[in-house]
Image: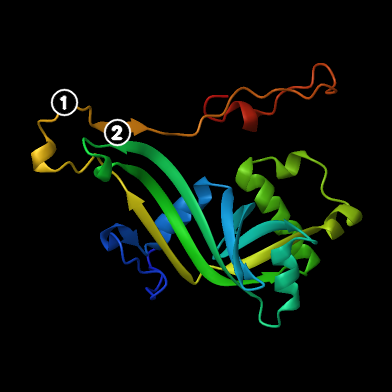
Amino acid sequence: MPADIPYPRTARTTPTRAPQRASWDRALVHRILDEGYLCHLGFVREGAPVVLPTLYARVGERLYVHGSTGSSPVRAAGGAADGLPVCVTVTHVDGLVLARSAFHHSVNYRSVVVHGTARPVTDAGEKAAALDAIVDQAVPGRAADCRPADRKESAATAVLAIDLTEVSAKTRTGGPNDDAGDLDLPHWSGVVPVGVRYGAPEPAADLAAGTPVPDYLTARPGA
């Protein structure tokens, strides 16, 4: 699907609060997803909502979510004839917005919400490619620089696939929205920027002396 064709709006992807911050722009959704690697996967188990943090990767118009073969969503998805209805969220916090009033405090953020049906990935080739993508989503270049999973490890690892069909993004930027009547109050007002910083790589205690740090690690911001 071309990046300039937006995702269709649905009742579930149209927010009722601050709808002007919502977007169905496909390129924006992809940028937000591609910048992260940790998502929250929501589903219903035995009539109660469950939300779990897990790793993910986007490959085209599909989201792959990592899990173990014994995890609740994997078992539920495998046991459902039509897959498991899920909601996946990804959020980046870009700033703390401090207003003169407590009511107008906020957060600058970029987020994506995905509604869909999760299905277990059973094809060996697709599963291997998805696991590589999940590794590279967190650390680009790492999948080719480590031992791939063996048969036993692969059997203990599960991947769920969710097609990107019912998706929306929501963002907030800018400063606080102080009320006119609060502008003369003596409280500091503005934005505290928030960002991700990677520290210098720390070698394992048993790493052979002289093993170089890979370029894909030293090139990361802050490394």
The answer to whether one can see residue 2 in this image is no
Q: Coloring scheme of the render?
A: rainbow
Q: Residue 203: give its label.
A: none
- Eyeballing the image, is 84 above or below 183? below
Residue that badge 1 annotates: 186
Identified at 51% across, 69% down, the residue is 115
Determine the secondary structure under disc 1.
loop
* Residue 151, image x, y percentages: 90, 56
184 or 89: nearer the eye? 184
- Look at label 2 and name its amino acid: Val
Q: In the figure, residue 60 lies in which quadrant?
A: bottom right
Gap in Å between the C-alphas at discs 2 and 1? 16 Å
* Residue positioned 33% across, 60% down in the render: 22
Q: Residues within 10 Å of mark 2 (few under 14, many from 20)?
A: many
Residue 207's place in the image compared with 103, above or below, is above
Question: x%, y% of residue 106?
Answer: 32, 44
166 relative to 100, above or below: below
Q: Is residue 3 left or right of residue 153?
A: left
Residue 89: x and y, percent?
51, 57
Residue type at mark 1 is Pro
In this rendering, position of residue 100 left or right of residue 219: left
Q: Name the residue under label 2.
A: 191
On screen, residue 188 versus residue 138, left or right, reads left
Sequence-first tag of 2 and 1:
1
In the rendered view, does 101 fall on the left or right side of 205?
A: left
- Residue at left 30%, top 62%? 17
Q: Which residue is drawn at 77% across and 69% down?
A: 123
- Residue extending farthest to the top is 209
